[in-house]
Image (tube, rainbow, N blue to C red):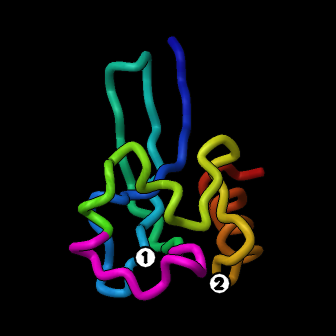
Amino acid sequence: MSLKTNFYIRTDRPQADGSAQVYFVFSIDRKQRLKFATGKYIALKPQYIGMKPEDILKVDAGQRDDLYCWDINSQRATKGNKNLERVNFYLTIEFLGK
């Protein structure tokens, strides 16, 4: 049995301020997945602040992650996100128990 955990942001559902919510995914054998909203949000990068949700959704889905202060590879908030350390600490401690 294979178990895997990931974090990702829901860029397909931007909030009114443009931020995206972080989700935790727990996968079992790549077949069964449980998704949980963490209650944490990732802000747009400074150059994109002020974009409306409609404008964000017009960006190609594969490139939307580039609009946010989020590192896909490390699955953590990056510089420019409000409360960067708090968000990353929360994701690590609360969900991964490290």
Q: Nearer the viewer, residue 19 or 39?
A: 19
In the image, what residue occupies the spot 40% across and 19% down?
30
Question: Disc 2 versus disc 1: distance between alpha carbons?
Answer: 11 Å
Q: Nearer the viewer, residue 21 or 52?
A: 52
**Residue range highlighted in magenta:** 43-55
Q: Quadrant of residue 95?
A: bottom right
> Relative to 91, is 47 above or below?
below
Q: Which residue is mark 1?
A: 19
- Residue, far top: 1
> Relative to 2, is 18 above or below?
below
Q: Earlier in the sequence, mark 2 or mark 1?
A: 1
In the image, what residue occupies the spot 21% across and 73% down?
54
Crowdedness near tag 1: few (<14), some (14–19) or many (≥20) residues, C-alpha within 10 Å: many
Q: How many numbered discs?
A: 2
Mark 1 belongs to which amino acid?
Ser
Q: Which residue is mark 2?
A: 82
Where is residue 21 drawn, in percent x and y? 42, 67
Residue 77 shown left or right of residue 56 in the figure: right
Q: Quadrant of residue 32?
A: top left
Mark 2 belongs to which amino acid?
Lys
